[in-house]
Image (spheres, helix red, strand yellow):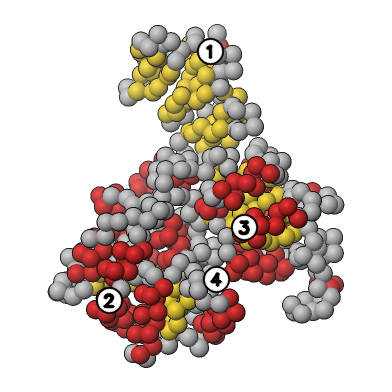
Amino acid sequence: MARNDGLRDYQQEMKLRLFEEWELHRSVMVQMPTGTGKTHLLAAVVKEFLCGGGVGMRVWIVAHRRELVEQIEETVARYGMGKEPDKSAKNGRTGKDSMPEESGRVRVFSIQWLSRNRKIMDGQPDLIVIDEAHHALAETYRELWKRYPEARKLGMTATPCRLNRKGFTDLFDTLITSWSIAEFIGKGWLSSFDYVSIRANSREQRLVDSLKKRGADGDYQVKEMNAVLNRETGIRQLYESVRRYAAGKKGIVYAVSIAHARQIAAYYSLHGVESVAIDSRTPALERKELVEDFRRGKISVLVNVDIFSEGFDCPDVEFVQLARPTLSLAKYLQQVGRGLRKSDNKESCVLIDNVGLHRIFGLPVREWDWEAMFEGRILGDTFSRKRAENGLSVACSLLEEGRREEEWEMVMTHGQLLDAIRNRNLSDQEEGRNALSVLKAFHDRCSGLWGLRRRNRVTVMPRYKEVFDTCADRAAVCLEDGRTGVVDDNGKPKIIIDRCRRLRFLKGELLAVTGNDGTDAYICLLYTSDAADE
């Protein structure tokens, strides 16, 4: 495995784990937080895939927006891969800088373009990479699985979750997860942050709580959000919070609608903060020019409507303002993630939550059960306030005493956040580690059989017709011959039972056995001997 590709240690680890998983599965999803270099990992993986696959291998990289296509093309070009050798040096590269053997083998498309032009595509891809793969449940993406079943698939995302109870296991065989956001901040790979929010009893929070209607995607209805929140007093509050907590800083604002975004930009500009609104109606060339002006510092604030939630790379963003309520965990983390990229001149980022999202989701440093969301066992939407108050997310919050009459509160400063990350209770860490290392079942779609794994390490290759239940280091399974039993984490039988309908673990070392006639019996596992010795 090549190691001279300039990857960071955690990216290198993810690459190694991915190629190990490809030994077992054709379709793998990779989760890494926003700002940790998913696109660079993607490019390194593609390069290694081509180098190891022989002449004629083809890779398609698919994104859901044209801006992402351009960004990915630029990144893969730095790795010596592109559509054609650039002998004209129009893109700042000469033909000798390209790798002729790989030119034309990597193509980057938007899913919209590919859907319209698939019939004219020549050849079959050997690898299909899906950027922002939490969108892959859409039918346009599913078509890729139907048309190219033999191609390997790689999905890249920061947030493997959806608002509906749909997991990704129909498309991806397994999920590889990276470190948590808290770990990346603690190790210095992501920026720390100050978190400012409207107060729970504020007028703005009551307005957000009054939203009742839902759109087709299950999130708040845009029309109602615009009617309730797009008003002068609310926009003035947005401006005042920026003036107080992020004066002179460069930032991104997330608005509820095109009209809302334009009103915010106009108000900020009127009060001396150079701002522009960008939305789906902004012409592509104009949008590109405005973004470049923002990167160069000619514009202080970009106000947008879901345009810069994903894939937007500008590390020196110093504040992110949430002016758009959402029920989507993915949207929340994608948005705040725009401010968490590291930059040489940025000590920390200010997250200004003008719609109280941390009361729904907790702070961005919460631990998320990505695997459960990937499998569709947990919705990628709201979490109860009680759950959000557990752990680092809200338990470390700071209230500004004596200022309760004000609209805002400092939930957490970057200094206290770093202290909380560094000084987490060891027992909590151990508890979390143990939870993550519990034995779990996974399904191999090709064979239809089930195997066992701890986190992303496979302990038993797919060999079981069914895995009824798991408990710590044991699994209740149905063997290929139809018999059932309990095996350890390496597949060694502990007890073998004749055919039955179901097995499940109970407290007190009890195993419940449901016979084919529906009756239940109970076995005490403390007094069973290893079946392997019989």
Q: Contact, CB < 8 Å: mark 1 with mark 3?
A: no
Q: Earlier in the sequence, mark 4 or mark 3?
A: 3
Residue hosting label 4 = 313
Q: CA distance from mark 2 to mark 1?
A: 67 Å
Residue type at mark 3: give it: Ile
Which residue does the image show at 59% across and 51% down from the upper left?
140
Which element carries disc 4, helix, strand or loop?
loop
Residue hosting label 2 = 231
Q: Earlier in the sequence, mark 2 or mark 1?
A: 2
Residue type at mark 4: give it: Asp
Q: Contact, CB < 8 Å: mark 2 with mark 1?
A: no
Q: Quadrant of the C terminus?
A: top right
Residue type at mark 1: give it: Arg
Which residue does the image show at 42% across and 39% down from the upper left?
377
Residue hosting label 1 = 483
Residue hosting label 3 = 111
Residue type at mark 2: give it: Arg
Q: Earlier in the sequence, mark 1 or mark 3?
A: 3
